[in-house]
Image: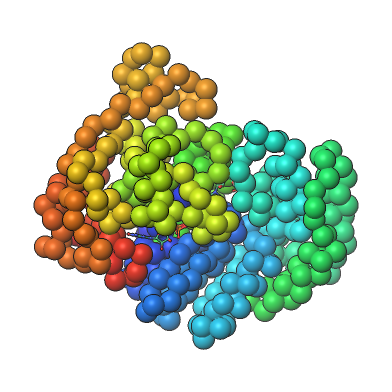
Amino acid sequence: MAVDVLLGLQWGDEGKGKIVDVLAPRYDIIARFQGGPNAGHTLIFDGKKFVLHTIPSGIFRTEQLNLIGNGVVIDPITLGKELDKLDEAGVAYAERLFVARKAHLILPTHRLLDAASENAKGKKKIGSTLKGIGPTYMDKTGRNGMRVGDLEHPEFRKKYDELKAKHLQLVTLYPEVDFDLEAEEEAWFTAVERLRKLPFVDGEFWINQAINDGKKILAEGAQGSMLDIDFGTYPFVTSSNTITAGVCTGLGVAPQKIGEVIGITKAYCTRVGSGPFPTELHGETGEFLRKEGAEFGATTGRPRRCGWIDLVQLRYTIMLNGVTQLVVTKVDVLNNFETLKAADAYLLDGREVSELPYDLCNDNYEPIYSEVPGWNSDLTSVNTEADLPQAALDYATYLEDRLGTRVSMISTGPDREELVMR
Ligand code: GDP
Ligand code: IMO
Ligand code: MG
């Protein structure tokens, strides 16, 4: 059986959590393959709301197994808090949530380094979520990191102390920041005991055995393709490969095992944190989208920057990921527009181009917009194609035409039930 992939095509927060939750019953296993607690995936059903950071969004479906893959970086403290929420909600996860031994651990001093490094950057800061993501992936590629499997090693504490000592040396490079290391460490070691209770697996064997047994697997992306370490708006990116290729390294799955690639885009565009955003709207319209779309970060609560959909950017990320079907979310947020705009080309040094410029941070460019009629009616809770106004269907057809990819789902609200399957 193939591994299907679901991932974000913009700067994150496209609604991945919701769509994974909806699709989960079609699969046997849901697996996270990269990122860590910088992610915030919101699920809303039966009048309840949950935000997951580390745990795959299949956890609320009782039949499915969930894997935190080797490509993920885990903060035991955040994971512990997520488990508390599951306990409160009476969700049985004991036999359904597995952790890959090769996943790296976020130490308290990784978070300290993240905070100190961001603080030292001043105006040039990345806008990191301060969850320790960058320093942890740096230790991974620098071959200093600690992995979940190290928790089973008798010298675990010694390894921890050595890495912490290295971090404390490094942090002296930066101006001091407020960080109660002692308290954070205490919480961390308590949370580690909690993590130990989850079943650890050799993720690559576990998942390939499942594939050979004919199980259906959905790989759940975090962040978005424009935050990819190689192809995003560098250096304003995260520290992992968020694209389909990340599934291979983040789970141990060979490329020919990848099946459908489901790419998610909002009907407009958002970004949280610093970095270029060519179609950003600074005035009233941007503010309107933020209000209508409740665009505040699920992890940090920061207001998200809002703008028009960028088709140049989407063609780029569809290409990078090999997207086979599109999901368009938050169409209901555009209920009150006579006309919508979409960037369909860029003017780069006075020349019209259809490809994303190399350096969105420094190149001299501006988006060229096309106009599309809005539906100017309430789509909230619509869940059949027949109930969508013609203008909304035409918008989907317009996107299919300009992006060369079929739109298989249209999301009309945050709830599990608010979705049109086509
Ligand atoms: P993720 O990180 O990709 O899982 O997305 P987030 O959970 O960070 O952000 C998406 C936000 O939009 C959440 O608050 C969702 O509840 C909400 N949402 C998802 N789909 C829709 C939709 O179709 N319409 C509206 N209005 N909200 C949605
Ligand atoms: P989900 O999975 C939106 C952004 C941060 C910052 C940059 C680097 O919910 O879509 P990091 O903490 O990774 O070092 O931050 O990436 N960022 C996200 N933006 N959604 C996310 O995840 C994000 N994860 C990181 O805001 O600009
Ligand atoms: Mg999010």
In the rendering, at what x and y percent does residue 265 appear? 35, 49
Q: How many marks?
A: 0
In the rendering, at what x and y percent does residue 337 appear? 23, 46
Q: Residue at x 82, y 40 (%)?
A: 175
The quarter of the displayed image where residue 39 is located: bottom right
Whether residue 195 is visible: yes
User: Which one is in front, 265 or 149?
Assistant: 265
User: Which one is in front, 165 or 201?
Assistant: 165
Q: Image height check: is 175 above or below 409?
A: above
Quadrant that contains the N terminus? bottom left
User: Which one is in front, 419 or 155?
Assistant: 419
In the rendering, at what x and y percent does residue 75 appear? 67, 62
Q: Residue at x 45, y 72 (%)?
A: 49
Q: Residue at x 75, y 58 (%)?
A: 107
Quadrant that contains the C terminus? bottom left
Whether residue 231 is visible: no
In the rendering, at what x and y percent does residue 333 appear? 31, 54
* Residue furthest to the front: 284
Q: Image height check: is 320 above or below 53?
A: above
* Residue furthest to the bottom: 90
Q: Residue at x 37, y 48 (%)?
A: 289
Give the colour scheme shown. rainbow
**Image side of residue 113 versus residue 396, left or right:** right
The quarter of the displayed image where residue 54 is located: bottom right
